[in-house]
Every structure is written in C-alpha cells, then in structure tokens.
C-alpha cells in the first residue's frame, strides 16, 4: 500500500522535520558543556539513557509496523528482510558512533572553532557520495544551496579559526567527523526506506551505545556524574537533543534528498551560537548574522532543489 500523500507535501514535511530536529540538537553543545563526565562518556550516556524511551516507542507503535513495512516494500526495490534491516541499523549506529567519538577527539586536539567548522562540512561529503554512489542529481539550485550554506558556516565560525601546525591532527579528525556524519545521513536515509523512525532510532542507538562504551571506559576522567544533579544534563541530552531532535531528523530523511537534508542540518550551529550568547554571554557580531543569513538562504535553495 503506497502513501496517498502528495510528494510535495511529504518533501515539505520532511524539510520541516529536519530543520526542527537540527534546531533541537543545537542544544546538545549546551548540555555537553554542563556535563560532569568526559565527552565520550557523555556521548555514551546520551545514547544509553535514550534507549528505554525509544524501546517504549517501538512497543507502542508496533501495530503500525506491518503497514509501514508493506508500504516500503511496494515503493523500494531494496527488500525488507531482517538481515537487510539489521545491516542498515548497524551502519547507522556505526557512523553515528564514529561521528561522536571523532568529534570529541577533534575538540581535544584542536580549537573548538576549527573542530566545529570542519565537522559541519558534512554537506560537501554527502553531496559527493550522493552523486557518486546514489546517482543523486546535482542541479543548479542544489549547488547554490551548498555554496551558500558552506559560506555561511565559514562566516559563523571562521573568524575564530586558528591555523597552527600543532592542530593538524585535530583538524584532520574534525574533517573525518564530517565524513562520518555524511555516512550517518546517507545510511539513515537508506534505513528509513525499510524501517520506521522508531525502529531506526532504537536499533542504531543500541549499536552506537555498545561501540561507545569501551571508548568511554578508556577515557581519562569520570565515567559517572559526581552528583545526582550531574545526571540532569545527560538526561536533557538524551531525551531532548537525541530522542526529539535526532528522531525528527531521521523522520525527515525519508522524505528529502540526503544532500538537501544535510544542508538543512546547518541550522544546528546557528542555534548553538544563539544559545551560547544567551546563556554564557558569548559574543555575537555582524559576521555571525551574515553566516546565519547565508545558511538560511542555502536551506531555501535546497528546498527549491528537491
């Protein structure tokens, strides 16, 4: 049974979900800053604390799963056998674990500005991989969207960049972070062709948590919060940024092309910058405003290209 919703409506709904999700995960940096445990442990608890609620979501949505599978079997040539689903969930979880781990290592070995900018280059790698492997069309509007969004990211963060030979390893890790996030976007888009959002979030989340656990235990620093209040930012990160934000993104990836979706995710650093200004008094200037404007213009062109 195929969906009767018009394609244009699904695309608009998908873009709205991705943008809302990106805005929500813009709060992740704030929760990470308030965390009492190491960055890798924070990432592990983000995943682990989200799993019980995600499992409940799957349980209560179980009556809709057969219908979803039937719809996707009719629309996709990829099949919906259990091995294919398991493979999809593994790769989504693997790439997300790689993204989180590489990002935290990058921040430790270079400046936050360098790591942030390089990590937000995922749209470039998504576009290249989508064109090479998924035969995604690169029309003029999409190219304009990509250029505007990348220019916006540079304007937003670039004024704080530091070019130092001591930061080369950290900068390379930041670039690897963007490759990993591109892998997450592409594998998430593929997984959503076969499985509903709840299943993708729960299955991939379990994989990510298992992969992050040994890294978190090996990290120097606290694995557990020192106080009960120390669990608050971890719960906020898990239930807000991850369950709400990441689920909206994963839902949207079923309805928008991967490259256009990755461009829309650049809303995240804009929200992070605004929250850092509001909560921690970090400076915002004309370049930040220009960067935000360019990113939003890029998103409009991305929407037009879909």
Image: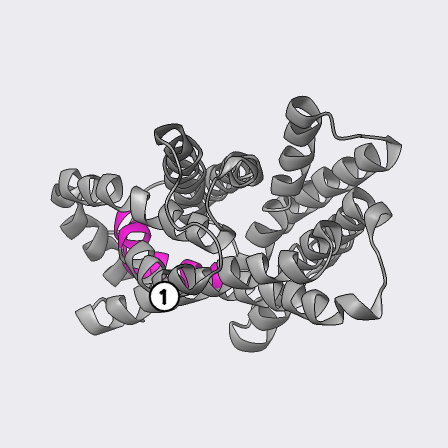
Residue 136 image-quadrant placement: bottom right
Image location (x, y in percent) of residue 153:
75, 48
154 or 19, which lies in front?
154
Residue at the spot of label 1: 214
Q: Is residue 118 above or below residue 53?
A: below
Tell me if residue 215 is in the magenta stretch: no
Residue positioned 58% across, 58% down in the render: 103
Give the crowd class for mark 1: few <14, some 14-19, many >=20 residues within 10 Å: few
Q: Is residue 254 above or below residue 166?
A: above
67 or 45, which lies in front?
45
Q: Is residue 238 above or below residue 212?
A: above
Residue positioned 86% across, 37% down in the render: 287
Please state the extent of the stretch shown in magenta in the rendering: 184-202
Is residue 138 at all visible to an observer of this figure? no
Residue positioned 33% across, 54% down in the render: 205
Q: Residue furthest bottom?
A: 132
Is residue 217 at all visible to an observer of this figure? yes
Residue 252 image-quadrant placement: top left
Tell me if residue 197 is in the magenta stretch: yes
Image position of 206 (left or right of 121): left
Q: Residue furthest top?
A: 278
Q: How is the image coloured?
A: one colour
Secondary element type, mark 1: helix
Q: Is residue 293 above or below residue 176?
A: above
Image position of 182 (left or right of 172): left
Q: Residue furthest left?
A: 63
Image location (x, y in percent) of residue 238:
38, 40
Q: Main secondary structure of the magenta part?
A: helix
Residue positioned 38% across, 68% down in the render: 91
């Amino acid at each position: 049974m195929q969906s009767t919703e018009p394609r244009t409506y699904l695309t608009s709904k998908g873009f709205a979900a991705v943008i809302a999700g990106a805005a929500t995960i813009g709060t992740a940096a704030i929760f990470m800053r308030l965390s009492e445990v190491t960055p890798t442990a924070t990432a592990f608890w983000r995943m682990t604390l989200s799993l019980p609620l995600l499992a409940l979501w799957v349980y209560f949505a179980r009556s809709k799963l057969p219908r979803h599978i039937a719809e996707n079997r009719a629309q996709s040539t990829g099949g919906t056998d259990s091995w294919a689903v398991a493979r999809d969930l593994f790769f989504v979880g693997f790439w997300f674990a790689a993204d989180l781990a590489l990002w935290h290592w990058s921040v430790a070995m270079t400046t936050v500005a360098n790591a942030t900018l390089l990590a937000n280059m995922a749209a470039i790698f998504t576009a290249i991989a989508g064109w090479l492997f998924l035969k995604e069309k690169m029309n003029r509007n999409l190219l304009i969207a990509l250029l505007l969004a990348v220019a916006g990211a540079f304007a937003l963060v670039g004024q704080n960049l530091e070019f130092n030979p001591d930061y080369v390893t950290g900068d390379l890790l930041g670039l690897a972070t963007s490759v990993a996030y591109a892998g997450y976007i592409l594998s998430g888009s593929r997984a959503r062709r076969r499985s509903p959002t709840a299943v993708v979030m729960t299955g991939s989340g379990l994989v990510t948590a298992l992969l992050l656990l040994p890294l978190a235990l090996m990290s120097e620093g606290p694995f557990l919060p020192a106080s009960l209040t120390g669990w608050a930012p971890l719960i906020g990160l898990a239930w807000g940024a991850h369950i709400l934000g990441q689920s909206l993104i994963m839902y949207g990836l079923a309805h928008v092309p991967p490259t256009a979706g990755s461009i829309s995710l650049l809303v995240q650093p804009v929200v992070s910058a605004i929250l850092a200004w509001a909560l921690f008094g970090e400076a915002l200037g004309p370049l930040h405003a220009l960067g935000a404007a360019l990113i939003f213009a890029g998103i409009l062109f991305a929407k037009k290209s879909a």
